[in-house]
Image (cartoon, rainbow, N blue to C red):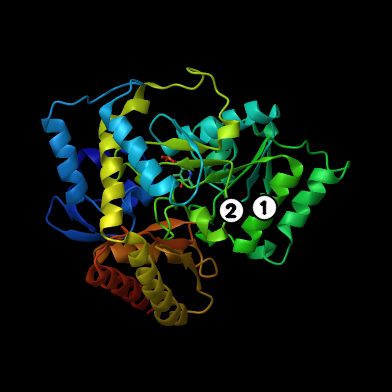
Amino acid sequence: MNIFEERESNVRTYCRNFPDVFHKAVGSTVYSESGVEFIDFLAGAGALNYGHNNQYIKQKVISYLESDAIAHGLDLHTMAKRDFLEKFSEAVLIPKKLDYKIQFCGSTGTNAVEAALKLARKVKQRTGIFSFMGGYHGMTLGSLAISSNNGIRLGAGVTSSHVTFMPFPYGYMENFDTIEYMETVLTDVNSGVEKPAAIIFETVQAEGGVVVAPIEWMQRLRNLCDRHDILLICDDIQVGCGRTGPFFSFERANIVPDIVAISKSISGYGFPMSLLLIKPEFDIWEPGEHTGTFRGNQLAFVGASAAIEYRESINLEYEVKLKESFLNTFLNEEIACLSEKIVIRGIGMIWGIDLSDRGASFAKAIAQRCYELGLIVERVGRDDTVIKILPPLNIEMPVLRKGCSIIKQAFFDCIN
Ligand code: PMP
C-alpha cells in the first residue's frame, strides 16, 4: 500500500479511479512512475487545452524565470501583466469587437464565479440569482449554492434562499419551453420569486453531462435578460479558451453576455488564473473593492500571453473544427450502435457518451476498462453516467484516433 492509498479516503474522486502515481506528461500523453503510458482525455478538466508541457509556452515561462523578472506581483503593475492585457485585447477582444473590462480574480474558477455574483448584486441592488439545473460553478459556498447537484451541495449549509434553479433545455425538459417558463416566473405575481440580479449559465453544461445549449435558446435567454433588466453571466470556465472552436463559447450564438467568467486554460500551462470580463457600464467596483493575494501570478500572465500567440500560430480554431467532425462521426457511427440507448452529445472538443439507460455501474466499468487499456477519461452527469471526452485541443490525430479506438475496445470488452 502506498502513501496515497493509506491517506486518501474513499470519497475522493479522480485519484480513486486512476490509481497510479504519475511523473511526466507531454502533449496528450501522461506517464506513470512504473512506465505505463496513458492518453489523456481529461486534460486537467479543461485546464490543459494546449497540452501538457506545451513546448512554446514552456520556453516563454523558462525565459521569464531566467530573467529574474517578478515572480509574484500582488496587484502591482508589472511587465507580464501589461503584456497579457495588451495581447488579450489586441488578439482576442478587439477582433471580436468585444468591449470588456478585465477583473483578475484570485486563482481558480470558483473565485471568478464568486466575484461575478458579488458584482451583479451590487450593480442591480438585488440579491437573487437564477441558475440552471445541471449547472456546475464551483465548490466555494457562493458558487456551490448556484450549482445544482445535490450530491455536492447537501449538508454544506449553502444559502439557497437567493437561488432559483431553472430547467435547462435537456432531457425531460427538452420539449418544455424553459424561457417561456422563466418569463412566467418573472411576471406572474403568484410566482413567489423575486426578480434576480443575474442569470448565470454554461453554453455547454460540462460537469452536468455534456449538455449543449441550443443557439436559439441562448439568444432568447439574452433577450429575456434585456427585457427584464437582469445581468447575463456566462460561465465559460470549462468550455471557453477555444474548447468549442472560437475563443469564447458564446460566440456560437452571436450573443454578448454582460459578465464572463474565465479560468482553467486561460494561463495556457495549468497555472491557476481566473478573471472576469465585465461590460464597461457594469464595472462599478472602487479600487480595492475586490482584491486577493494571488491575483498577481506572473507566471500565469506569461503563460497566458504565450498561449494566445501559440493558438494563433497553429490556427487552433480550424483544428478544433476538424477534430469535432472526426469525433462526431466516430461516436455516432462506431459507438452509438454498439449498445441500445447510447446517446451522444457534444460540440468542438467536448463530447459525452450518455449511458444513463445502462446505469452508473456500466459507465464506471467502461471508464475503468479505458484506463486499463491506457486512456484517462472522466465520468460526469447527474449520476456519473456520462463518459466525457475532453482531450487537449492540439492532440495529434493519430493519438486522438488511438484514444477513440480504446473507447471502442472498452465497449466490446464490457458488453461481451
Ligand atoms: N465553472 C465551471 C463550468 C467548471 O467546469 C468549473 C470546474 N470544473 C468551475 C466553474 C470551478 O472551477 P475551479 O475548479 O477552478 O474552481
View quadrant of ligand 1:
top left
Asked which secondary structure carries label 1, the reply is: helix
List the residue tagged with mark 2. 255
Compare residues 398 and 322 and report the one nearer the observer. Answer: 322
What percent of the width, then of the height, locates residue 185?
80, 46
Asked which secondary structure carries label 2, the reply is: loop
Q: Disc 2 marks which amino acid?
A: Ile
Q: Earlier in the sequence, mark 2 or mark 1?
A: 1
Asked if one can make out residue 93 in the rendered structure from this viewpoint, the answer is yes
Residue that appears at 51% across and 19% down? 289
- Which numbered circle lies on residue 284? none
Asked if one can make out residue 139 in the rendered structure from this viewpoint, the answer is no
Mark 1 C-beta closer than 8 Å to ligand 1: no
Find out whether the residues at labels 2 and 1 contact each other: C-beta distance under 8 Å: yes
Farthest right residue?
189
Q: CA distance from mark 2 to mark 1?
A: 10 Å
What percent of the width, then of the height, locates residue 384?
48, 56
Residue that appears at 37% across and 59% down? 390
Circle 1: is it few (<14), some (14-19), or many (20+) Cα within 10 Å? many
- Which numbered circle lies on residue 221? 1
Q: Quadrant where the C terminus lies? A: bottom left
Q: Would residue 199 be found to the left or right of residue 375 on screen? A: right
Compare residues 160 and 295 and report the one nearer the observer. Answer: 295
